[in-house]
Image (spheres, coloured by chain):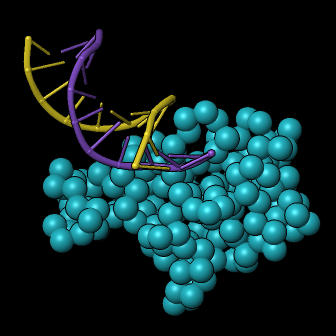
Chain colours: A cyan, B yellow, C purple
Amino acid sequence: MTRAQRHWLVKSEPNAFSWQDLWSSPRRTTSWDGVRNFQARNFLRDDMQVGDLAFFYHSSADPTAIMGICEVVRAGYPDDTAFDSKSGHFDPKSDPKKPTWYMVDFKAVRPLAHPPTLARLREERGLSKMVLLQRGSRLSVQPVTDAEWEIIERIGANG
DNA sequence: GCCAACGTTGGC
DNA sequence: GCCAACGTTGGC
C-alpha cells in the first residue's frame, strides 16, 4: 500500500547543524537525532516515509530561512543518542527495549536559490495557516500541505 | 539579552 | 486531574 508523498519542515539551529553541514556530510545524509518532543516524535516515528520531502529551516539564525530540500531516506527508527549517557540528548527514561525517541535519516536534495526568510513567508497570503507561522509555534518537525509546499518552492526558485 | 509561549514535571 | 513552577524554544 502506498500513499501520496508527504511534505514536512524540520528546524535546525545552524550553530548546531546547518544546511551546509548536511550538504557536506557523507552521502549528504544525516540521522535526525535529538528530537525530544512527543508531537514531533510521533511524526518521525509514525508518519514520515522514505521518499517524503522536507524543507530544512534555520532557526535562531540571521536570517531565519528555509535553506533547502531534503528527502527521507530511512523511516523512523530508535534514536540511540537517548541511551548514551555521554550524549547531550541522553534520556535516562528511554528504555532500549521500548524506546521513547525516534529519528529518521535525511539526504540533502538541493538548496533553494533564494532561501525564503521567515519575514518573506509571512508576506504570503497562501501561507497564513502554515504551522511555522502560527503564534508561539515551536514544533521542530511539522507537516507542510501540498499547496504550501508549491508556494514556498516557487519563492525559493524565483525570490 | 529579553521575554512570550510552550511543554513537562511534580505536589497536592 | 489540576495547576504552579520550571526549563526550553526561538523571534526579535
Q: Nearer the viewer, residue C6 or A21?
A: C6
**Residue A91 point in image, percent of width and height:** 22, 56
Q: Nearer the viewer, residue A157 or A45?
A: A157
**Residue C1 point in image, percent of width and height:** 29, 11
Instruction: State left or right for residue A80 relative to residue A120.
Output: left
**Residue A37 point in image, percent of width and height:** 39, 46
> Which image quadrant: the C terminus of chain A?
bottom right
> Which image quadrant: the N terminus of chain A?
bottom right
Residue A116 sits above or below residue B8 on the image: below
Q: Residue furthest right?
A: A158
Q: Nearer the viewer, residue A97 or A101?
A: A101
Quarter of the figure with residue A39: top left
Quarter of the figure with residue A109: bottom right
Residue A130 sits above or below residue A79 on the image: above
- The residue drawn where x is 86% and y is 38% is A125
Instruction: State left or right for residue A123 relative to residue A69.
Output: right
**Residue B12 point in image, percent of width and height:** 8, 11
Quarter of the figure with residue A112: bottom right
- The residue drawn where x is 36% and y is 51% is A36
- Residue A30 visible to the viewer: yes
Residue A128 sits above or below residue A85 on the image: above
- The residue drawn where x is 16% and y is 55% is A92
- Residue A55 visible to the viewer: no
- The residue drawn where x is 57% and y is 62% is A61
